[in-house]
Amino acid sequence: MAKSSAGGSGIPGSPTAVRIVVAGEKGTGKSSLIVAAATDTFPPNVPPVLPDTRLPPEFFAERIPITIVDTSSRPEDRGKLAEELKLADAVVLTYACDRPETLDRLSEYWLPELRQLEVKVPIIVAGCKLDMRDDNNQVSLEQVMSPIMQQFREIETCIECSAQKLIQAHEVFFYAQKAVLHPTGPLFDQETQSLKPRCVRALKRIFILCDHDRDGALSDAELNDFQVKCFNAPLQPSEIEGVKRVVQDKLPEGVNDRGLTLTGFLFLHALFIEKGRLETTWTVLRKFGYNNDIRLADELIPYSAFKRASDQSVELTNVAIEFLRGIYDLFDGDGDKNLRPQEIEDLFSTAPESPWKEAPYVDAAEKTALGGLSVDAFLSLWSLMTLLDPARSVEYLIYIGFPADPSSAIRVTRRRRLDRKKQQSERKVFQCFVFGPENAGKSALLNCFLGRSYSDNHGSGTNDRYAVNVVDESGGGKKTLVLKEIPEEGVKGLLASKESLAVCDIAVFVYDSSDELSYKRATELLVEVATHGEDTGFEVPCLMVAAKDDLDSFPMAVQESTRVTQDMGIEAPIPISSKLGDFSNLFRKILMAAEHPHLSIPETEARKSRKHYSRLINRSLMVVSVGAAVAVVGLAAYRVYAARRNTSS
């Protein structure tokens, strides 16, 4: 495995240009340093602030253009300075070797200021005017900078230079460029002296991709293929033996009779980084599509495949679903159809992290008695991630080894507006918004949908909460239903957006059937949502759910609720009891209403008025049409009569 001789230009994830901002105290030599690096001369007179200086691609071996931005140290220019720093790929902070107070200002002002501005880029500290330092006050750079670098770990490199003597002026910007192209931070933890977890996961994926025969080791032929792919040059047999010998001497388990193991592969990269050869590991990562965040570069994610109208959604294709079924079986080591937490962690060990450890996924699917996932629950979580964040879903499919074109993993559904016209939805995944006043039973409904006790403490608080599961259809098929709980206090904010209901296939309004105020508030929410849908053109089918059916209903409850729903042209409230586990086939009814959206769209007074007006217009047009037809027939009859009369005479 050889050192790369060229940068990652043209490789997905590799920067195509570098912007370096130079900042520091007044008089520390910022402008002179830039001119010396760009022209190999020391300028006797330089302006207070230079215009942007561009170094051509051939300036350094990586052949990537560099723009160097000079900045003013005047207090009145701090706003402009802050803007430039936020646009930087790297920052060079200067101090004057002959003025110790300027070094103190780095830790007193400049480095804290960069943190305050949230400038999270590599920092190079450059001690300028090295030729002017007092010979009687010689202190090593390491001795001076070590305490500062301990406090500010964002400092990548420290270097002393002299613009007047042309000492290491080029090197300042070489190290700045190198810190951008080959940063240490994402790869290596300086405190533990070990590879960072995300780097390990990426290298593990690369190892698996290169292990063509899947025997857990890279053979000599596989190592050679890897070398050619990453560095465009083969390894000689003696070089391969040398690599394996280095690993085996330090880490016997790094090599076995089949070749270099994953442990040995990771050890080699840690060794490269420790020896300052970060460009080797970065070249490997970039050849396999990783960016500086150790994630797949945007160029590898087919964003154009996700383009959709606001009332379209994204679903997994059968190709992706079959792949995921195979992955499930592969990692379900004991074949018990229960993917345990550790098995899920192993499955995602080639991704930057497990995507389901945080909201909205962490509690969104049904768990088995052993805390794992069934096949349906596993696929449901993938469907939820594809619905909410298709780019992330495709990205993670690639991480776990999806072999086909990534765009073949997903499909964009037909517009919901067209579904209503066609009176049928072709979706496989339906999203249901669950509205209702506080304590109506929304959270209990979601819990029971996931097979949990109605009293489980999985309330949503102020954040949206999701529950996803497979629902059996009456015809024997299966569809995925996503329930999204909308807190009462979140309704106003939701309806403030014109397109907020565009992503909704059906809305359910839950109320406490023993509480008249709860029912009235749910009815108000129904009217608000229905009206918003009419006004924006994103009408949604609606159902009402009378929760807590095990409690005594308020007087006139059934009669009043039936009258209201009949008046709005939707199904009467569906009584359920989460406590008793009696759901009256609610989830299947939700699914059926979503599949046939035209049947459950509520009629508000405004909609009725429009319908009545349309009927009047149609009747008027019919009268006019009949009158016109009579007139036409009469005129024709008269013409026939007149013609006959003329003939007889």
Image: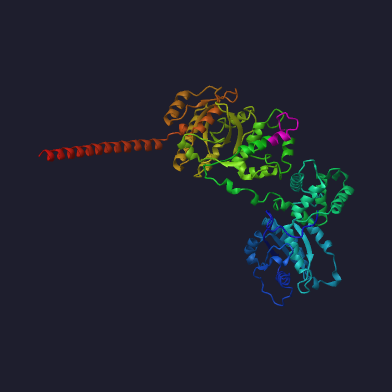
Relative image position of residue 50 (x, y in whole percent):
66, 71
Q: Is residue 366 above or below residue 91?
A: above
Of residues 609 and 95, which is closer to you in this image?
609
* Percent x, y of residue 46: 69, 75
Is residue 328 one of those drawn in magenta?
yes
Apparent side of residue 104 relative to residue 424 in the rendered image (left or right): right
Q: Residue furthest right?
A: 249
Residue at horizontal 77 percent and vertical 72 percent from the top? 166
| Residue 152 is covered by the magenta coloring | no
Residue 501, image x and y in percent? 51, 40
Which residue is depicted at the point 83% across and 72% down?
Answer: 134
Look at the image and give the residue range highlighted in magenta. Answer: 326-339
Position in image of residue 532 (x %, y %): 47, 40
Q: Can residue 145 be seen in this view?
A: yes
Please tell me whether residue 326 is drawn above or below residue 126 in the rendered image. above
The one nearer the camera, 346 or 543, is 346
Task: Count up the numbered dots.
Answer: 0
Residue positioned 73% across, 51% down in the render: 285
> Which residue is pictured at 88% across the width and 47% down the height?
248
* Residue 184 appears in the figure: no
